[in-house]
Amino acid sequence: MISILKESPAVQLQSLDEARAIAERIRARMRYDVMGRDEVIELVLVALFGDGHVLLEDYPGSGKTTLAKAMGNSIVDDSADDHIVDFRRVQFTPDLLPSDITGVMMFDTEANDFQFRHGPVFAHILLVDEINRTSPKVQAALLEAMAEKQVTVDNVSHPLDELFFVIATQNPLDSVGTYPLPLAQLDRFLFKIRMDHVDRSSELEVLASWGKPRPRPEQLEKVSRGQVVAARTLLRETVAVSVRVHECLVDIARTIRQDRRVTQGVSTRSLVLAIPALQTLAMLRGRDFVAPEDIEYLGVPIFRHRLAVIPGVDEPGKVVTDAMRGPLEALARSTLR
């Protein structure tokens, strides 16, 4: 059985300039709340408008919750479903159950029937803290939601909102009592982003502003959920992706798979997910076509976490960089003809 999600009023956008303006409004609000994270903010924006999900590998206190909340608070809920909220945060622990995130059937004494109680996964922006702290069963329940945008409880499938976006985190140093995500599950994330400590000037700015009221400028307007969904649709239809870009991506993937340092290469799914991400980056940079520099910028964040490498190879990103060199040169030459 499948439960029916209430339909939301459709939003229509006419140009990429409108879509870019929506993205820039979210970026401005996030930069106001999160200092010194411009590159991370851009990648998260690419994932949001590229309909992907993000895994942040970070240290405690690096601002991941603030970043996720800033994004959630930038989007106004205009959906028709009362069960879906703007933002939820879930702390993953070893004793967590799948029903703790998906929801559970509860007996309603007034209706004399079982009713579905929605879990925290029914949100537009979902922050999953320390995803590797919980059991594989809970991880699998979340990954079904990420891949299918639905959850199944008692043989009934409950659809999530079209906007549904996950920001998951894990600590790269503390591995005691964790359940590392296998490559098949890591492949569900568009990006795995490493968040290093911010620079000195940004930390000083954080300390100087701590405890002081910071009224948000009026020009930092929010956007609606419908505008984000409409922008996703528009850039898929409007930003051109040439056959040569497809060939470049396939050649990069094949080069990675043939590299002697690699024991498991990137999947075809990663190439499919790369297309809307590249279209989004092109849109953010004012173009209506995907260019070689887009692949060069996003190649490592897209492919690095999907590789299994031989012992002694500490940086899979170097493998990706080496594999991109030849196909990107061929793509650049073809665009000059």
Image: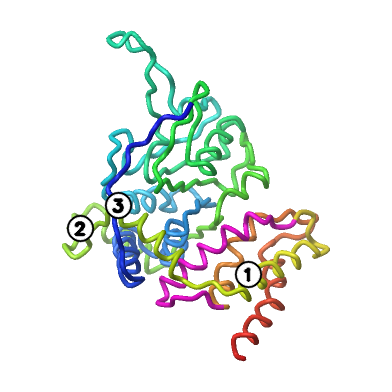
Image-based side of 296 in relation to 234, left or right: right
Q: Say what amino acid the circle numbered 3 marks.
A: Ala
- Up/down of 107 relative to 99, above or below: above
Spatial separation of the CA atoms under disc 3 and disc 2: 34 Å
Q: Earlier in the sequence, mark 1 or mark 3?
A: 3
Q: Secondary structure at mark 3?
A: loop
| Residue neighbourhood size for the residue with mark 3, other residues' Cα within 10 Å, grouped as few (<14), some (14–19), many (≥20) | few
Residue 42 placement (x, y as % from top left): 43, 65
- The percent position of residue 65, horizontal first and vertical second, equals 39, 47
**Residue at the spot x=66%, y=73% of the render?**
248
Q: Residue, x 22% and y 62% (percent of image)?
A: 220
**Residue 191, position in %: x, y?**
55, 57
Q: Are marks 1 and 2 in contact (CB under 8 Å)?
A: no
Q: Which residues are magenta?
A: 265-291
Look at the picture and state if 68 lies above or below 245. above
> Which is more N-terminal, label 2 or label 1?
2
Task: Looking at this view, name the residue that lies furthest to the right.
Answer: 260
Question: Mark 1 or mark 2, which is nearer to you?
Answer: 1
Q: Which mark is residue 214?
A: 2
What label sits on residue 10 in the rendered view? 3
3 up-or-down from 23: above or below: above
Question: To which residue does mark 1 refer?
Answer: 246
Residue in view at x 42 percent, y 19 percent: 105
Amino acid type at circle 1 is His
User: Which is in the foreground here, disc 3 or disc 2?
Assistant: 3
Q: Nearer the viewer, residue 170 or 112?
A: 112
Query: Could you tell me residue 289's position as x and y percent?
Result: 49, 76
